[in-house]
Amino acid sequence: MNPGNSYLCSGKKYIFVPYLSFMEESARENICDIKVFRAVFNAHSQDLYNFLYYKFGEENHPEDLVQEAFMKLWNNCKNVPFEKARSFLFTVARNQMLNELSKKKTIIRYSREKPQNYTTESPQYLMEHDEYMNKLQVAISSLTEEQRVAFLLNRIEGKKHKEIAEILGISRKAVEKRIYNALRILGEKMKDK
C-alpha cells in the first residue's frame, strides 16, 4: 500500500500513513495540538478498545473507559510527551478498569454480608438522636420555600453558591442571603429551651 492512498475497512474510509513517518513528524509536536491529538486518537482508540474488551469483557463498558482515558490524556496533554501517549492511554484505561472491578467486588462482598441487628449506642443516645432529628425536620419545614431549597441544595447535596444561583436563576448574593437566613432561623429553633 502506498502512503497517502485511501482504503475502505468496515465501511469506513482510512488513509494509509506509515507509522514511522507519522512518529517522526509528530514527535516534535505537542499532543495539545488538536490535529496531533486527533491523530493519536485515530491511531490508538481501536487498539485500546480491543485491549479492554478482550481482557475485561463487554459488560465492563470498555468504550466508556476509552473515552475517559482520552479525556485524561487531553487534560494532561502538556505533561505527556508524544512518545508516551500510547502507554499513558493504556495505563490509565487499565487502572480505571481495575478500579471499577474493585468497586464491583466490594459491592458484591458487602451485599453478601448480613447487616448488624444491634448497635453500640445507648438507648438514651438513640432516643436523643431521634428527638433531635425530629426537631431539625420541624425547624427545616418552618423555613420559607426559597430558604429551604437553597439550604438543602447547599448542605445536603453539597452544591456551591454559584451552582445554586445557576440552578435557581438568581444572583449569588441572593443565595448567600437565603442560606444565611436559613441558618439563623435553624439556630434559633434548635436551641435548647
Image (cartoon, rainbow, N blue to C red):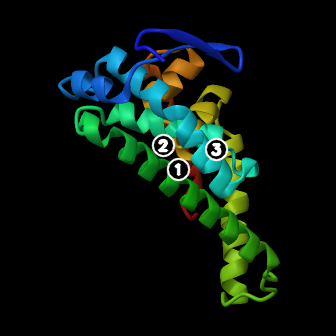
Image spot of residue 10 (x, y percent): 71, 21
Q: Residues within 10 Å of mark 3 (few under 14, many from 20)?
A: many
Q: Are marks 1 and 2 in contact (CB under 8 Å)?
A: yes
Q: Are marks 1 and 3 in contact (CB under 8 Å)?
A: no
- Looking at the rendered structure, the secondary structure element under dot 2 is helix
The amino acid at mark 3 is Pro
Residue position marked by numbered label 3 in the rendering? 62
User: Is 140 situated left or right of 16 in this image?
Assistant: right
Using the image as rendered, state which of residue 75 and residue 135 is in the foreground: 75
Q: Is residue 73 above or below residue 53?
A: above
Sequence-wise first label, 2 or 3: 3
- Give the residue displayed 53% in from the left and 9% down from the top: 6
Residue position marked by numbered label 2 in the rendering? 184
State the image quarter where residue 30 is shown: top left
Q: Is residue 182 among what the camera can see?
A: no
Residue position marked by numbered label 1 in the rendering? 188
User: Is 36 situated left or right of 166 in this image?
Assistant: left
**CA separation, marks 1 and 2?**
6 Å
**CA separation, marks 1 and 3?**
53 Å
Q: Residues within 10 Å of mark 1 (few under 14, many from 20)?
A: few
User: Is 171 situated left or right of 75 in this image?
Assistant: right
Image spot of residue 165 (x, y percent): 50, 21
Image spot of residue 12 (x, y percent): 65, 14
- Give the residue displayed 73% in from the left and 78% down from the top: 127
Q: Residue furthest front?
A: 1
**CA separation, marks 2 and 3?**
49 Å
- Looking at the rendered structure, the secondary structure element under dot 1 is helix
- Looking at the rendered structure, the secondary structure element under dot 3 is helix
Q: Is residue 130 above or below residue 31?
A: below
The quarter of the image holding the C terminus is bottom right
Q: Is residue 142 above or below residue 39?
A: below
Using the image as rendered, state which of residue 18 and residue 171 is in the foreground: 18
